[in-house]
Image (cartoon, rainbow, N blue to C red):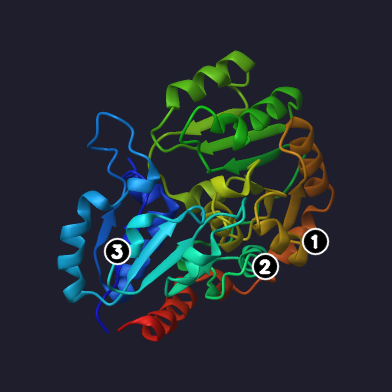
């Protein structure tokens, strides 16, 4: 089987080792080989280039590469019908990594070899829209990197938030402002944020303006996430829109692997898994009140929630399980 050619539609991240999709593709490359290509041309352009044109500047080179690849594997947060994919001659697998917030173009996706989603909610949405090639593949992390370190719950609840914003607007849509406001209102809430090198000064300005420097830590460098998780009680990820974060945020999967509960907003599809397994709390509204209600619920039931986390088999979100599912898919669609 020839290796896949992986495609990302985002700009190259400043910290690829801290970016979930880059980690996922790196794990697949360790199993199948293959190169990584960035379809987004905006790092070279003085004017913004719309998504409809992504990849066309590379088309001649990509066609040359097709002689040595098995499939094109595209990763994108939402089911956007990139026109360039119609010009590829090798089969195309399109992995939708975020939740689905709008009805996809079924005719476009049915022309591809497969449309992959990581959760049952998104699978049902694709199928109801008429997408006939939808496949469920759960994301995987290196679970062996994490060890279970119990953190007794006293009066203070310490949360980790590792889904940092890419834009100023995402301080609202990713619930960063909600978390900071919750910390300002509740002295017994502590927050640790893992940052990506983007908008760090803006974040620190907000922390200072709310006067929560003593309760909020922002780590703007690569760290041992396992060591950080050992210091917190749970991990939180928020989003007002299903399409702006991964359906299963890696920060929450890391938390489960370390034996720590998760808090997640209803819009994120992982909320369905959290409710089903009891491994955390679901927050209905992204705001300070919703955060504080979720924290109170978690604190009230902390011990049984921790037990539910540890009952989840570690292989549920392992790299090996994800790679096995993709191997089957690659072999099915490769030419």
* Residue at 15%, 67% in the rendered image: 64
Return the residue at label 2.
Answer: 128
Front one among 53 and 258:
53
Residue 121: mark in rendering? none
Residue lying furthest front = 107
Q: Nearer the viewer, mark 2 or mark 3?
A: 3
Residue carrying label 3: 87
Please tell me which residue is depicted at 41% across the width and 59% down the height of the picture: 75
Q: Is residue 120 visible?
A: yes
Question: At which x and y percent is residue 260?
Answer: 64, 56
Q: Secondary structure at mark 2?
A: helix
N-term-proximal mark, 1 vs 3: 3
Pointer 2 and pointer 3: residues touching (CB < 8 Å)?
A: no
Give the camera-side residue of 253 and 230: 253
Q: Is residue 24 left or right of residue 59?
A: right
Question: Relative to 29, does residue 191 appear above or below in the rendering?
Answer: above
Tell me if mark 1 has few (under 14), some (14-19) or many (20+) residues whose alpha carbon lies within 10 angstroms of its own.
some
User: Would you name the residue on which mark 1 appears?
Assistant: 304
């Amino acid at each position: 089987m020839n290796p896949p050619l992986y495609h990302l539609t985002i700009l190259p991240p400043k910290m690829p080792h801290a970016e979930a999709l880059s980690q996922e593709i790196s794990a697949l490359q360790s199993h199948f080989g293959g190169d990584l290509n960035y379809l987004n041309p905006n790092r070279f352009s003085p004017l913004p280039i719309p998504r409809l044109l992504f990849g066309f500047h590379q088309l001649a080179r990509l066609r040359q590469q097709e002689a040595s690849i098995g499939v094109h594997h595209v990763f994108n947060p939402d089911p956007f019908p990139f026109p360039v994919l119609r010009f590829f001659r090798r089969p195309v697998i399109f992995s939708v990594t975020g939740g689905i917030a709008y009805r996809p173009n079924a005719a476009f996706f049915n022309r591809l070899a497969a449309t992959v989603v990581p959760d049952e909610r998104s699978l049902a949405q694709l199928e109801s829209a008429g997408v006939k090639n939808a496949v469920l593949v759960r994301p995987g992390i290196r679970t062996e990197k994490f060890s279970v370190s119990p953190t007794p719950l006293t009066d203070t609840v310490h949360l980790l938030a590792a889904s940092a914003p890419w834009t100023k607007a995402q301080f609202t849509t990713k619930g960063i402002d909600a978390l900071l406001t919750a910390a300002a209102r509740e002295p017994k809430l502590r927050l640790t944020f893992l940052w990506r090198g983007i908008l760090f000064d803006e974040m620190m300005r907000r922390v200072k303006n709310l006067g929560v420097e003593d309760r909020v830590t922002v780590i703007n460098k690569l760290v041992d996430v396992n060591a950080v998780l050992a210091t917190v009680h749970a991990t939180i990820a928020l989003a007002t829109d299903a399409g702006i974060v991964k359906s299963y945020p890696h920060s929450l999967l890391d938390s489960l692997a370390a034996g720590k509960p998760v808090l997640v907003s209803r819009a994120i599809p992982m909320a369905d898994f959290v409710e089903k397994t009891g491994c955390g709390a679901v927050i209905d509204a992204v705001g300070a009140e919703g955060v504080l209600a979720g924290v109170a619920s978690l604190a009230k039931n902390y011990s049984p929630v921790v037990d539910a986390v540890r009952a989840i088999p570690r292989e549920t979100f392992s790299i090996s399980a994800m790679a096995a599912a993709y191997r089957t898919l690659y072999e099915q669609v490769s030419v």
